[in-house]
Image (cartoon, rainbow, N blue to C red):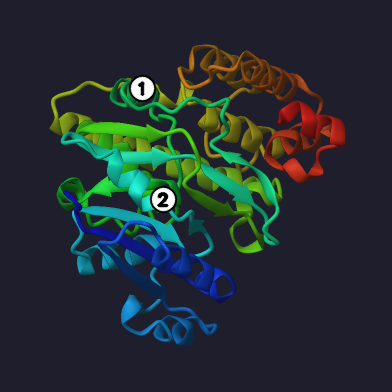
């Protein structure tokens, strides 16, 4: 009745945060826990710190191969019935693992939770995903077949059943060097149920090394996200085919987050935008339509904010493009009034 849980911490040069991450696992209220720390070729003092924990952790030291290779190595060394992946710059609240285990009924393969967001100094800055975004759980399979994405959490806010992971791992390292957990979460709805925890079970830290999604509006950032989306869509279609299911043919025109990246890329750098047939007003139209029909967007005010953003960026003159892109993607550049509005 108390299954063994494996927590796999993936680390690369996060000695500043690593101890807090490991200690949060050691201090869990759940007893039957193995802590595996995978160091992905760090060049700081992470190795010494990991070794200082002795037999409290299972250390794995490997050459740098990216997050996916680290998660694969950690899973291969694990033995728990349930698996969690904890980023080394994040940490759990004391009852996190207990809360995860409680939700694993017989047919549940994934449990997802919100996270408290903090900055480098530990100052709270929000909840991810925000409470205005409803988790897709019981309808996740339907949503992903129709839209190519469902509302879920990031690495630290996820837990999985081992028997499910054994069917899909290892993570393809070449395709999923970035956003490694995406390969798992797009597969899980096909294999069983998803259960959600509406309260945060831990902390997601946003800081310089992982702030690429919030720090600037470089066009290449958006192009990378678009490229990854198409890889993810391919994984969904391949998996759906294995289960005899028929996914939508136009994920890219129903996926709200994809459309925000795609419109931003097109407006900021049309010459290098990866889809040369895109047209700003048309992308804005599809973005607005996706907001109106997205099942996870239950907040009317949030729908309105996205609709206004798509409308403004779709038709704005070139000199205003950077301003409108920054409003959505760089929260710290918003005025006090706009921070209140977006919050």
Q: Nearer the viewer, mark 1 or mark 2?
A: 2
Of 39 and 68, which appears nearest the observer?
39
The image position of residue 311, as x and y in percent, is 70, 17
Which residue corresponds to the image point at 86% horizontal and 36% vertical from the top-left?
336
Chain-order first, disc 1 or disc 2: 2
CB atoms of marks 1 and 2 within 8 Å: no
Q: Is residue 65 left or right of residue 18?
A: left
Q: Is residue 60 visible?
A: no
As drawn, the label of residue 286 is none
The image position of residue 148, as x and y in percent, is 38, 28
Q: Is residue 289 visible?
A: yes
Of 246 and 51, which appears nearest the observer?
51
The image position of residue 53, as x and y in percent, is 40, 82
Which residue corresponds to the image point at 81% horizontal and 35% vertical from the top-left?
323
Q: Residues within 10 Å of mark 2 (few under 14, many from 20)?
A: many
Q: Which residue corresponds to mark 1?
A: 143
Vertical comparison of 178 with 226: above or below = below
Quadrant location of the C terminus in the rendered image:
top right
Q: Quadrant of residue 70?
A: bottom left
Q: Is residue 299 left or right of residue 134?
A: right
Measured in 3D between alpha carbons, the distance from the residue under mark 1 to the one under mark 2, in whole angstroms, is: 27 Å
Query: Regarding mark 1 in the picture, which secondary structure is present there?
Result: helix
Which residue corresponds to the image point at 52% horizontal and 34% vertical from the top-left?
275
Which residue corresponds to the image point at 39% horizontal and 60% vertical from the top-left?
28
Q: Quadrant of residue 177?
A: bottom left
Vertical comparison of 302 with 214: above or below = above
Q: Is residue 142 left or right of residue 95?
A: left
Vertical comparison of 26 with 340: above or below = below
Q: Residues within 10 Å of mark 1 (few under 14, many from 20)?
A: many
Query: Regarding mark 2 in the picture, which secondary structure is present there?
Result: helix
Of 325 and 195, which appears nearest the observer?
195
Q: Which residue corresponds to mark 2?
A: 96
């Amino acid at each position: 009745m108390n299954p063994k849980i494996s927590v796999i911490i993936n680390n690369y040069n996060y000695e500043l945060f690593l101890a807090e991450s490991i200690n949060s696992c050691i201090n869990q209220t759940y007893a039957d826990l193995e802590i595996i720390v995978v160091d992905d070729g760090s060049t700081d003092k992470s190795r010494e710190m990991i070794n200082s924990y002795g037999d409290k952790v299972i250390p794995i030291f490997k050459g740098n191969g990216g997050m996916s290779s680290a998660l694969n190595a950690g899973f291969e060394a694990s033995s728990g019935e349930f698996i969690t992946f904890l980023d080394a710059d994040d940490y759990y609240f004391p009852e996190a693992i207990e809360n995860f285990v409680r939700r694993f009924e017989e047919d549940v393969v994934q449990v997802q939770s919100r996270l408290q967001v903090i900055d480098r100094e530990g100052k709270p800055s929000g909840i991810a995903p925000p409470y205005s975004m409803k988790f897709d759980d019981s309808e996740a399979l339907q949503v992903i077949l129709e839209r190519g994405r469902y509302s879920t959490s990031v690495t630290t806010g996820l837990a999985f059943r081992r028997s499910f992971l054994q069917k899909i791992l290892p993570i393809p390292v070449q395709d999923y060097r970035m956003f490694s957990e995406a390969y798992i979460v797009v597969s899980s709805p096909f294999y069983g149920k998803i259960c959600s925890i509406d309260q945060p079970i831990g902390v997601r830290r946003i800081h310089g090394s992982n702030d690429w999604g919030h720090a600037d509006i470089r066009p290449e950032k958006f192009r990378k996200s678009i490229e990854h989306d198409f890889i993810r869509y391919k994984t969904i279609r391949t998996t759906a085919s294995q289960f005899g299911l028929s996914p939508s043919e136009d994920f890219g025109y129903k996926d709200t987050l994809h459309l925000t990246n795609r419109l931003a890329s097109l407006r900021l750098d049309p010459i290098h935008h990866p889809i040369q047939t895109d047209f700003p007003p048309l992308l804005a139209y599809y973005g607005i339509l996706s907001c109106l029909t997205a099942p996870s967007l239950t907040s009317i005010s949030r729908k309105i904010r996205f609709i206004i953003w798509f409308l403004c960026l779709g038709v704005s003159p070139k000199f205003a493009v950077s301003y409108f892109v920054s409003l959505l993607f760089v929260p710290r550049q918003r005025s006090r009034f706009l921070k209140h509005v977006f919050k």
